[in-house]
Amino acid sequence: MDSAYAAGILHLVLGSFLLWIVPAQLVFFADLVAFPVSLFFSVRSIVSIWCLKKAPTTAHVYIDKKEGEEEPLHVQANDGSTTVVAQTTARSSIRNHQATKRSKDSIPGAPLRAQNNPPMIIETKRKVPLMRVIMLVAQLALFVMVLDFVYRPLVFPGKDLVVFRPGYVSHEAAKLHIRYPRQEHLEIRYRASGQNMPWESAGGLDPPTELTDFTTTVDLVNLRPSTKYQVELLSSQATVRADAVLLETAEFKTAPMPHSPTRMRFGTGSCIKPNFPYQLTTSPDIYGFASMLDHSDNLDMIMFMGDFIYADVPLYFGTTVEDYRRLYRQVYMTKSARRLVSRVPMLHVYDDHEIKNNWHNQNDAPMGNAMVAYNEYNGAPNPPAELPGRSFYNFTHGNIAFYAWDTR
């Protein structure tokens, strides 16, 4: 196996490992080295063969010919390759060389070979091996996929993302998490599910500001226990056809009365990365959320147990608040996430990758900026924290108690 094939296979192995097995940072860095090396060897090999395919070749010629038969010439070049050439192609060259004489110990009927004849120049045609071309195309395609997987948050930062979802829902109130980046006054209305139930207005809402990445949380109060509600987010910007424009919809079911006997069904999840395992698509998804959607009609809530984003995998973009916000927007941009969180309330605890791998230093940077983004997107819709500035909380659903700890 020559250097071009070896380097190409190494790049293919590293890129495949990154996209479909573990998107580790070290693997990405190794592939950044392996790809240009493999590209250099592959291109050099193909160009060399292409440029020399019609060049004259210094070769030794022998004729595989039994007496009385007409056979092609076999040209053995200095690089060890053998090319079959018609006798008529090389006939003029052969005339200029010394005559071939039979060896004394030759066996009758054996092939005649040139004895002591000097190398002669014969024009041969070399073909670029198809396997080398396929290898080069595969290397380029895989590296494009790696770049798409790693740098998509920078190319598509999700500045126009709109989010409207329920967070914590008690027996009498619900938190609604909103992200709306346009400067338009908003209105929320809600109603209990059922035929001909009237809509009630939760009042107007000033547009969120850039200070919180256009996110806010609104409380709906005076709700009925164990009741399913529909909610709508509308823009109060009047149009020719309507007084308001429907932007997003969501639904939730309130909890039973405290201490009442309860049966509950909830989902859990953790450790997600958009479009992993990788698929070549213009609409990346989160495949665990897509599976949850199949059961979402019967779920009372989802408890997400951390690593909602991977700030450092496969590449750590930086420590600013925007670096973290961008990753949360990437998750909420996916089609399955948008559908799931609008239908089922989702509560959160954070883990290390919301900050950095194996992070546990509460008072050191980048903990502060990371928690700002976490609270804007996932922390604010949670139940109230037990202590100001902390993330652990507890709540009840009927006679079932939940305790969410902060172990970082």
Image (cartoon, helix red, strand yellow):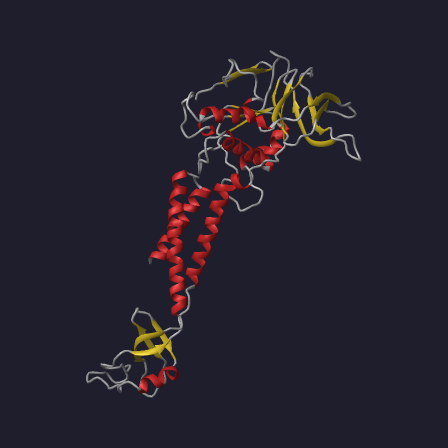
Quarter where residue 300 is shown: top right
Left-right relation of 85 to 308: left
**Quadrant of the image for the C terminus?**
top left
Q: Residue at x 38, y 60 (%)?
A: 44
In front: 189, or 370?
A: 370
Q: Residue 250 at what x, y percent from top left? A: 67, 28
Quarter where residue 224 is shown: top right
Res 401 seen here: no
Left-right relation of 161 to 364: right
Q: Residue furthest top?
A: 259
Q: Residue at x 38, y 65 (%)?
A: 48
Left-right relation of 266 to 362: right
Q: Residue 187 at what x, y percent from top left? A: 71, 25
In front: 243, or 271?
A: 243
Res 146 seen here: yes
Image height of 253 relative to 40, above or below: above
